[in-house]
Amino acid sequence: MTVFSLPGPILLVLLLPLLFPLFRSRSARKRKSMLLELLPVLLYCVFLLLALVFHGGCGLCHQLPETGLYLSLSFGAVILCYLAALPEEERRSPAPFLLPAMTTLSGVVFLQKDHSNLFAGGGVLAGALCVSSLLHGGAYPGAYLRSFPLRLGLSALVIGALSMFGEPRLSTPGFLLAVLLASVLLLPAPLPRRTEKVLFPGFLRTDQALFVCLPPLLVFHLLRGIPAKAAIPFWPILFLGILTALSGLLFAKTALFVEELADGLTAAGTGFLIAGFLTFLPEGRNGALFLALLLPLATALSGLSLSFLSQRFRTRTFQGLSALGTNVEPLRLAFLLGAFQGMSLPVVGGLLGEWLLLKAISSVSVGVAVLAVIGVFLTFVLVVERARTLFSGESVSRLSSSDMILASEVLPSEGWALSLASLFLLALDLIGSLGLIAGG
């Protein structure tokens, strides 16, 4: 079997996102609606959703892993939001071609079932991320010329090597440590702090989509390659997962740029995901899957709101944006809805996912569970603090009064992006609250 061992009709559907540049060009020439522009990726998401709904009664759909369908659908929804936000005038960014290509590739990888294919596909996807980071170095010289491509490349090599292990050896401590190493190497890396220049909007949003939203899905994809019979609690790995989570929160707390906040919070959530999954308990697996689906969508919504705010006022630092979001109410609401997902508040989905993870972790180690609870509380404090910094107080801006009026308005493309991300996030909350998501 190969990593592309999927039925022909499925592969044809997975190629749909590659039509996005063509539809985007035709839509721009004929001044058609945004819906036509997004149609290829929208159809891709609709197919995955139907495959989930009819999974038990459709022979073709039943050949696909249910968990893989969830992962592919989540990333497809994320990309749909980012494609809606890509500015027409952006010429130097590879985003219109790179995002659809990565969507197709991730679908092919996530829909594998064989253990060796899971890891081989994960290695291919990590390698594609490495190539993408090098392409981005051309879009903004120096942005990824530090250790990030090296980390991604090393992760791809480790994951590829794991695909060569036979199934009986997948439950050894050394194998689990290798999976953890490969996962940690995939976590986001900050952009260099030597400049406050605002990046090209298309580049900045592609950076968020690929290197912040995709890693939690890929990490869960790697973890599900570990067979359920490896049911020996390995609490030191749980501790390392929580330590990764707390390190992510520390990075978010000391962040200088707004995009680094998303980097840190996603790293924190992914560490929590790893710890919960590696309890090898059903609730840990289900909670980890829910968090893997939640993190990219929540990051997309809150990350896009900060990206739009940064673009309006031409600065990426928290100090430079202090209180400037006060007069941009839609962005404040979007940021809060996305950020509150990981804060274990009632109504939003983070409560369910984190409750399942805490239940699983406490069954293995009460001490590690206490650290996890501390992390959840610190997340709450951190997000509230950042929200107050950006979206409350008296706004003192360098812009004129007429420019401030324009800055407070949401552009049509931004409205599409925020609406789609909010819709998908609320739908995920509803599905999770009904208990319809299982990590089997």
Image: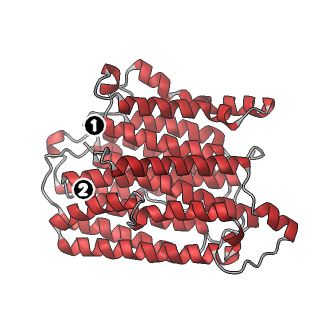
Q: Is residue 271 left or right of residue 418?
A: left
Identify the secondary structure beneath mark 1. Answer: helix
**The C terminus lies in quadrant:** top left
Q: Say whether residue 345 is visible.
A: yes
Marks 1 and 2, how far apart at CA: 23 Å
**Residue carrying label 1:** 116
**Identity of the amino acid at label 1?**
Ser
**Identity of the amino acid at label 2?**
Gly
Residue 13 drawn above or below residue 289? above
Q: Position of residue 81 (x, y in %)?
A: 58, 46
Q: In the image, which is nearer the foreground, mark 1 or mark 2?
A: 2
Quarter of the rendering containing residue 241 = bottom left
Q: Residue at x 68, y 29 (%)?
A: 22
Q: Position of residue 229 (x, y in %)?
A: 13, 46
Q: Residue at x 45, y 57 (%)?
A: 151
Badge 1 or badge 2: first in the primary sequence? 1
Instruction: Identify the mark at residue 338; answer none if there is no mark.
Output: none
Q: Residue at x 57, y 42 (%)?
A: 80
Tell me if mark 2 has few (under 14), some (14-19) or many (20+) residues whose alpha carbon lies within 10 angstroms of its own.
many
Residue 264 drawn above or below residue 17? below
Q: Position of residue 430 (x, y in %)?
A: 40, 49
**Residue carrying label 2:** 284
Q: Nearer the viewer, residue 267 or 393?
A: 393
Quarter of the rendering containing residue 317 = bottom right
Q: Nearer the viewer, residue 46 or 247?
A: 46
Residue 199 drawn above or below residue 91? below
Q: Say whether residue 142 is visible.
A: no
